């Protein structure tokens, strides 16, 4: 008890450090560190910087003793460096003559020790009598950590000795000392964590302190099983403090709002990568030298960035909704983070070889991000298709603007616009990875599948009453050409997504067939009156109906010339068959006689008209070449005078024109043809 009473008497009121001594100590610390930016604990009396009070010689003597002991401790622990002397307590001691050279040699030795931080160390002598709780706490606040820790160990030793002497029912004094230990250790750990947390942001300030921090952690880990210590691993707390520092560094990277900058995410990721690289460069070049090798400081920071940045990109994913932002995020995660720009930077090699550079992400994060990206691709394409249809209305349908021509064919920029859009998305994804590329191709084709029907619906709604009719026809042909070209473009993705290509192809083919069918029906409707009046008495003396038929066939030829193959040839072939069938069919539908050599005139007219119509279909490259001879054969039949001769000339007609095999012709009159109601099988 007498020993404890004497110590309390030395400590002043309340067992704390004398105020005058603390004031002088703080003022000396501020002067040694330049007076600017020095840390001041809450509740301290800063005093006047211009005229500091004269120190009490007794107090100064106590401070000199404390500082000399601290210097001895640091030398034994190999603490501090030349760069940190502004923060070292030895700076408070007045220099005498002839000391400069000795200090320079000592600083050089400390610098060498700093450069080669050893794993082992020699713990300085633990004080026989610890300072008071208040004094130890002040040392922690002022970051005189080595002195504070040695006194904590002394206090802990006292606690252990008293605990061994006491019975199971611990007295109040032992409980109080245990509480004091917990509080002081808690403050020390908080201070250690704060220093570690800020070490990569304030390297010049914390460089020397980290050496003391590392030795404290080592010593506490060694004494973990002894009573009186703090619960929990000090190394684990150190790793958490590293994470906190990395988290603060990541949080400090500029992150603008979407409304401030449309490229907010790309800018942020670029700055984030730069911050990660620069911080790890600093850890590799400087920070790790303040720790023993067992701390594996560089690997700890690499792993911490993997965890913290992985969590950070998870938050960014929640904010990213636009296609460009999701693409930037995917590309950064999959490619850029491990590239030479960040973790693969030459400045970090070869230390990175022993550490993984991957981000620590949730198991379902990348699949979820890919799904989100593919959905955004669909939404983006859908919006593009809406704009295309709107532009069609504004640029063509509304004002009746004629379509453009390219290489004498009706053309439209639509297929190339869609192809460029899709291929741009696919190409960008190809740079990320093959898995994403295939999924994006599938998504694009799925969305494109619905486009033909959407365009057709709007076109029908706006253009059913379009005038003149020529424009309607040209628009139909233009879209036939468009979707033929678009199918050809999308066919390049068949190897990646054959089912999706076929599904889109079926929709495009269906639309093309409907467009061509509408053109066929229009043509048939227009020529039906002219064909109906063929082979009549009026027809024999009047060419008006045929001239109209001829002009319409000529116009059809002009339209087919604007259509891309193979649709032009298929379209012309179907109409060639229709005209031929209807023309010949007029001879089958009624009975009439040709007298006074009118049959010869009729035969000549049939031959002439058939040749003129056939010329147009030849120009259109109709595939029904066998129809060209039917006119001559039919003319030969009509030119005959009696039924026997007619029968002799029917065989070539039936051979050249297969549809005639369903008919049996009889001579109702010298120049009459009549269909058989029950035709024989062909």
Image (cartoon, grey):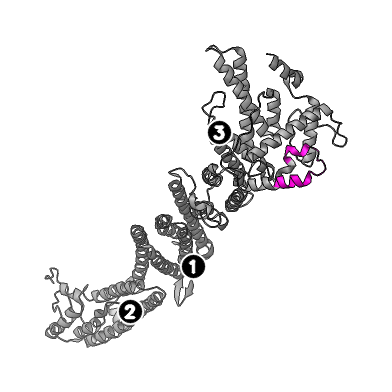
Q: For the point 46% across and 71% down, which residue is it? A: 411
Secondary structure character of the magenta stretch overall? helix
Q: Which percent across, then down, holds residue 561? A: 40, 77
- First in residue order: circle 1 vs circle 2: 1
Q: In the figure, residue 121 lies in which quadrant?
A: top right
Please tell me whether residue 142 is drawn above or below residue 324 in the rendered image. above
- First in residue order: circle 3 vs circle 1: 3
Name the foreground residue: 622 vs 647.
Answer: 622
Q: Which percent across, then down, holds residue 213? A: 62, 37
Name the foreground residue: 617 vs 540.
Answer: 617
Q: For the point 47% across and 67% down, which residue is it? A: 416
Q: Which residue is mark 2?
A: 621
Q: For the point 45% across and 48% down, which residue is it? A: 366
Q: Nearer the viewer, mark 3 or mark 2?
A: 3
Q: Which residue is mark 3?
A: 234
Q: Which percent across, then down, holds residue 351? A: 53, 52
Name the foreground residue: 345 vs 223.
Answer: 223
- First in residue order: circle 3 vs circle 2: 3
Give how far apart the Cα atoms at labels 1 and 2 are: 27 Å
Mark 1 Cα-neighbour bin, 10 Å: few <14, some 14–19, many ≥20: few
Q: Which residue is mark 1?
A: 413
Taking the magenta stretch, the answer to whether it contains residue 90 is yes
Mark 3 Cα-neighbour bin, 10 Å: few <14, some 14–19, many ≥20: many
Please tell me whether residue 254 is drawn above or below residue 346 in the rendered image. above
Q: Nearer the viewer, mark 1 or mark 2?
A: 1
Taking the magenta stretch, the answer to whether it contains residue 519 is no
**Total marks placed:** 3
Give how far apart the Cα atoms at labels 3 and 2 are: 89 Å
Task: For mark 2, give the secondary structure.
Answer: loop
């Amino acid at each position: 008890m007498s020993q404890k009473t004497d110590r309390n008497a030395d400590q002043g009121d309340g067992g704390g450090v004398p105020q005058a001594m603390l004031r002088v100590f703080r003022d000396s610390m501020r002067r040694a560190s330049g007076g600017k930016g020095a840390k001041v604990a809450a509740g301290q009396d800063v005093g006047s910087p211009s005229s500091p009070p004269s120190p009490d010689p007794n107090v100064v003597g106590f401070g000199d003793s404390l500082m000399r002991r601290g210097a001895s401790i640091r030398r034994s622990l190999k603490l501090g460096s030349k760069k940190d002397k502004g923060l070292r307590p030895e700076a408070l001691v007045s220099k005498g003559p002839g000391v400069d050279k000795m200090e320079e040699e000592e600083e050089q030795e400390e610098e060498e020790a700093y450069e080669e931080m050893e794993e082992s160390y020699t713990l300085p002598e633990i004080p026989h009598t610890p300072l008071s709780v208040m004094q130890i706490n002040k040392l922690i606040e002022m970051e005189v950590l080595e002195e504070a820790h040695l006194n904590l160990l002394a206090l802990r030793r006292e606690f252990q000795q008293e605990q061994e002497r006491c019975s199971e029912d611990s007295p109040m004094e032992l409980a109080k000392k245990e509480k004091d230990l917990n509080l002081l250790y808690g403050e020390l750990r908080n201070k250690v964590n704060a220093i570690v947390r800020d070490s990569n942001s304030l390297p010049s300030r914390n460089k020397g302190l980290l050496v003391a921090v590392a030795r404290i952690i080592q010593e506490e880990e060694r004494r973990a099983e002894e009573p009186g210590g703090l619960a929990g691993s000090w190394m684990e707390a150190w790793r958490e403090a590293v994470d906190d520092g990395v988290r603060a560094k990541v949080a400090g990277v500029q992150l603008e709002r979407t409304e401030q900058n449309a490229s907010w995410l790309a800018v942020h990721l670029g700055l984030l990568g730069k911050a990660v690289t620069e911080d790890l460069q600093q850890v590799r070049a400087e920070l790790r030298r303040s720790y023993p090798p067992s701390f594996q400081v560089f690997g700890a920071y690499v792993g911490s960035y993997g965890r913290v940045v992985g969590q950070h990109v998870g938050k960014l994913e929640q904010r990213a909704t636009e296609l460009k932002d999701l693409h930037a995020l995917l590309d950064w995660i999959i490619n850029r983070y491990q590239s030479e720009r960040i973790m693969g930077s030459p400045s970090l090699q070869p230390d990175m070889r022993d550490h993984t550079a991957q981000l620590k992400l949730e198991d379902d994060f990348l699949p979820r991000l890919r799904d989100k990206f593919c959905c955004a691709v669909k939404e983006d394409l859908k919006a593009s298709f809406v704009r295309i249809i709107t532009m069609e209305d504004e640029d063509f349908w509304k004002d009746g603007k004629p379509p453009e021509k390219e290489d004498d064919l009706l053309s439209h920029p639509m297929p190339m616009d869609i192809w460029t859009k899709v291929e741009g998305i696919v190409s960008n994804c190809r740079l990320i990875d093959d898995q994403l590329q295939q999924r994006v191709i599938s998504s694009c084709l799925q969305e494109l599948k619905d486009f033909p029907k959407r365009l057709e619906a709007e076109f029908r709604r706006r253009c059913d009453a379009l005038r003149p009719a020529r424009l309607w026809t040209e628009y139909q042909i233009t879209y036939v050409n468009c979707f033929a070209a678009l199918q050809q473009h999308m066919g390049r993705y068949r190897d990646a997504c054959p089912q999706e290509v076929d599904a889109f192809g079926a929709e495009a083919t269906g639309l093309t067939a409907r467009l061509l069918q509408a053109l066929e029906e229009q043509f048939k409707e227009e020529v039906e009156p002219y064909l109906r009046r063929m082979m009549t008495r009026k027809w024999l003396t009047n060419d008006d109906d045929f001239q109209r038929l001829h002009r319409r066939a000529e116009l059809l030829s002009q339209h087919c010339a604007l259509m891309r193959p193979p649709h032009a040839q298929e379209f012309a072939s179907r109409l060639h068959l229709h005209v031929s069938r209807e023309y010949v069919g007029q001879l089958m539908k009624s009975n009439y006689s040709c007298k006074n050599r009118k049959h010869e005139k009729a035969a000549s007219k049939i031959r002439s008209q058939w040749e003129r119509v056939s010329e147009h279909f030849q120009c259109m490259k109709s595939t029904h070449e066998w129809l060209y001879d039917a006119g001559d054969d039919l003319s030969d039949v009509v030119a005959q005078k009696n039924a026997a001769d007619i029968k002799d000339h029917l065989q070539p007609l039936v051979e050249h024109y297969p549809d005639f095999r369903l008919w049996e012709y009889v001579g109702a009159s010298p120049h009459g043809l009549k269909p058989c109601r029950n035709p024989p099988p062909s």
